[in-house]
Amino acid sequence: MKNLSKKIILLINIGVALALCFSYLSNFVSPSKIWFFSFFGLAYPVILLINIFFVIIWLIGKKKLALISLIVILIGFSYVGRFLQFQLFKNKQELSGVSIKVMTYNVRLFNYFEWVHDKGVRDSILSFIKTESPGIVCIQDFFTKNAQGISEKYIRNSLSDIPYCHIGYTYSFSSGTDYGIATFSKYPIVNKGGIKFNNSFNSCIYSDIAIDKDTIRVYNVHLQSIRLRQDNYGIIDSIFKRNTKSLDDVKDISVRLRDAFVIRAKQVDELKAHMASSPYPVVICGDFNDTPVSYTYHQLIGNKKDAYRESGGGPGNTYRGKLPSYRIDYIFYDDDFISANYKTSKINLSDHFPVTCYLRLKN
């Protein structure tokens, strides 16, 4: 019986080691071709911890068996830095010359549906942005409604210290209600454009911004959302509380995740091709709705740099919703820049935290 138990544990260990390998493959295999691996990429932190647990277990007894998980962990060890950074001092450096404070923030419709039971959230968000005084701020889930004090004019007046703006609405409802994405800048926006994703509320805009004698292109992107229903969140809560739910409910969430993976992959390929044709150095900010171990991340980072990995420290999570907290909001930039002072502000005004960093063009 004892030997049988060890064999079962060994088989489980081999299974989770294989799952970790599948999570690595999620970086390279497009979900539009094979979506299976994306679920393993989503679960990467949990799978990694289970493998670390097995390494510890085998080190106590059969030390050689610890190599099963240890080797697999070491193969993808660089991925750990996408979630956790130990550069606790590097992000305190100062940038000489002209530096630009960049912010990305999904404001969740300025709390229009009162997910946070506080009618002052809209003004708190705008006040926060004004206080932080970014040179460039990319806003996702941008929402205006003329009849209820969230008009575009009101928002622009509130952010008058950031006077230039580029707003791309992807959907207009009745009664002067609009939804989209917006980039505000202290520097002149000399050219504007957008990428409209097919059959999606999500979108991307790009703004060519003149800074002194240079021009940069800033992509503000909001990639495909999962679009969970309200009752889906209740199911997620019940899973964490170990309550039993029907297989159909879990299947519904899985299908929504799968569909989002597939649609996002197509959006990423389109966005990547567009960025390759940019005549200017590129900064890409936004809510990618995907984790750092994913096809989305791997394709968009390309030869670019991740501000969190270059100048951040500590845990990288930017999402605070009911799903496990992940880093899904990013600031990437071409090698023409250097970054400093990456920061995630842990304020509870949206289901996302705002992210900022300073960028400077190299001489």
Image (tube, helix red, strand yellow):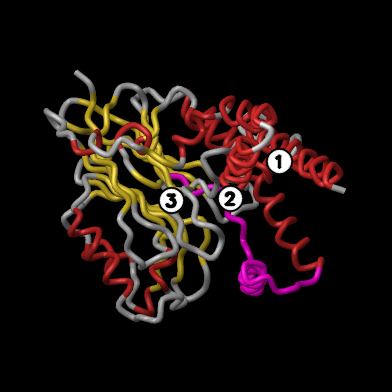
Q: Residue at x 56, y 26 (%)?
A: 74
Instruction: Report if residue 176 lies within the magenta region.
Output: no
**Please, is residue 259 above or below residue 55 in the view?**
below
- Residue 293 x %, y %: 56, 38
Q: Nearer the viewer, residue 175 or 220?
A: 220
N-term mark: 2 or 1:
1
Q: What amino acid does circle 2 point to? A: Gln
Q: What amino acid does circle 3 point to? A: Asn
- Residue 14 x %, y %: 75, 36
The quadrant the C terminus occupies is top left
Q: Residue at x 39, y 28 (%)?
A: 305
**Please, is residue 194 above or below residue 63 in the view?**
below
Q: Check disc 3 and report the residue beneath it.
A: 317
Labels 1 and 3 touching (C-beta < 8 A): no
Residue 304 got which mark?
none
Tell me if mark 1 has few (under 14), some (14-19) or many (20+) residues whose alpha carbon lies within 10 angstroms of its own: some
Q: Check disc 1 and report the residue beneath it.
A: 16
Dot in front, 1 or 3: 1
Q: What amino acid does circle 1 point to? A: Val
Residue 266, can we see it?
no
Image quadrant of residue 150?
A: bottom left
Distance from disc 2 to disc 1, alpha carbons, whole Å, reads 29 Å
Label 3 SS: loop
Q: Check disc 2 and report the residue beneath it.
A: 224
Image quadrant of residue 231?
A: bottom right
Labels 2 and 3 touching (C-beta < 8 A): no
Q: Which residues are magenta?
A: 220-246
